[in-house]
Amino acid sequence: MTDNMPAEEDESVEHALRVGLEDFDLSDQDRALLDAGEALPTGDADGENRPVVAVIGRPNVGKSTLVNRILGRREAVVEDVPGVTRDRVAYDVEWSGRDFTLVDTGGWEVDATGIHLRVAEQAEVAVSLADAVLFVVDATVGATDTDEAVVRLLRRSGKPVVLVANKVDDQRTEAEAAMLWSFGLGQPYPISALHGRGTGDALDAILDVLPEKSAVSAYRSGGPRRVALVGRPNVGKSSLLNKLAGEERVVVDDVAGTTRDPVDEYIELGGRTWRFVDTAGIRRRVHQTRGADFYASLRTQTAIEKAEVAVVLIDAEESIVEQDVRVIQQVVDAGRALVLAFNKWDLLDEERRYYLEREIERDLAQVAWAPRANISAQTGRHMDRLVPAIEVALDSWDQRVPTGRLNAFLGEIVAAHPHPVRGGKQPRILFATQASTRPPRFVVFASGFIEAGYRRFLERRLREAFGFEGTPIEVSVRVREKRRRH
């Protein structure tokens, strides 16, 4: 196929398409993307050492209003319904000549259930991945039980905290803000996020405690590659880590969810050092049985975000369950490289192997691109198969397709399988470029809407042509109109 096409031909195809693209209305953002050429940003290294500030507080204390005030533009969702911000959202901010990343989180409720549980999880992940915390309290309400619980969470985290008393619009509320010294977090900064009063002082205080470079950055490059060992409780993660490390470093117990403290292990495997990121992350409240799954999921999320590649451990003796699929989906959503490791493989008889293959085809079809390793954590059998699988996944995650190659390839695909005609029109693919790696993201410029089915077809063909084994890839489409001639 395109492998035999000389580079000059690729480049001439690219040049012709670029010239044709000039007939279309392009934004400044489009042009910046096209001019980036082969100097490709990695999704992982983008702003890699910028310190991170998490904005935390219970629902409806004005976190998003404060974020908008700091940004100077209305970007965060602000609504009078408590708890509109669901997930963490990160923004790049500059204050007094310093750049940092601001992470807006949903409200943190102690007895959270359902969607609120997910929001609380995101807030805890944000704290664990931040260098400092802006803790927002509603001064008109004063300290609530939930606020006290957040204070305990923040104390445990050991992160520097700047306490902000919001909704202080007059002398009376200023006196109420002073009551918040009782938290023991130092001076409460009285502000009005709505009117901008006092926010500068709070930001100055944040700059005083922020390191020059992020100490916890999940996006730091260099050093040993970071691997997260994840999976639903009790599939053998700790046994596998112990076997890999060659010593008993992790508490192993038959009670699901006994992993407590964060443990990062540097492990020699296949002739190189790997950093296995802890899957403990956050200490579980033992008395909260209902919260057990919540904390397991929280640990998983934190580990995945700190890693570059996730090895998802699946118990081959048992049927694949929704929880396995959910962990895999977390890895894909986080844009990390993925390896599937089937544990206890040595214990399977022929019949179980047959049924397992059917389950994989049925339940894991979405990640058919992920390399597999069949292992035994208990005996250490076939551990050597993990390293090649991890290396393949990371190479794909880092892979860059030259723009000329990409467009020559897409030209052939589109000529053989054009997009279906819809409403009398047939959208044309004008040009494509790879916007970033880690994971690979492609932007396709088109003359009309490209259907989801055709995008999936393009993704499948990209995988066939260029490998991408073990990494999610993203294909986004920018529809551009032809320029009107005056």
Image: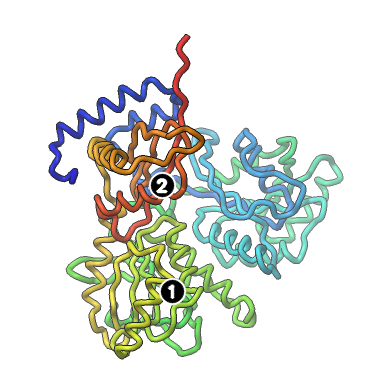
Viewer can see residue 320: yes
Residue 105, compared with residue 445, is above or below; it is: below
**Element under label 2?**
helix
Q: Residue at x 78, y 45 (%)?
A: 167
Relative horizontal placement of residue 353, taking residue 364 as reference (left or right): left
Task: Give the tally of numbered discs.
Answer: 2
Viewer can see residue 241: no
Tag on residue 455? 2
Q: Residue furthest front?
A: 424
Q: Residue at x 64, y 39 (%)?
A: 68
At label 1, the amino acid type is: Gly
Q: Position of residue 69 (x, y in %)?
A: 66, 37
Provide the residue designation for mark 1: 231
Q: Position of residue 65 (x, y in %)?
A: 69, 42
Relative horizontal placement of residue 348, taking residue 166 as reference (left or right): left
Q: Residue furthest right?
A: 172
Q: Disc 1 to disc 2, how far (Cα)?
A: 30 Å
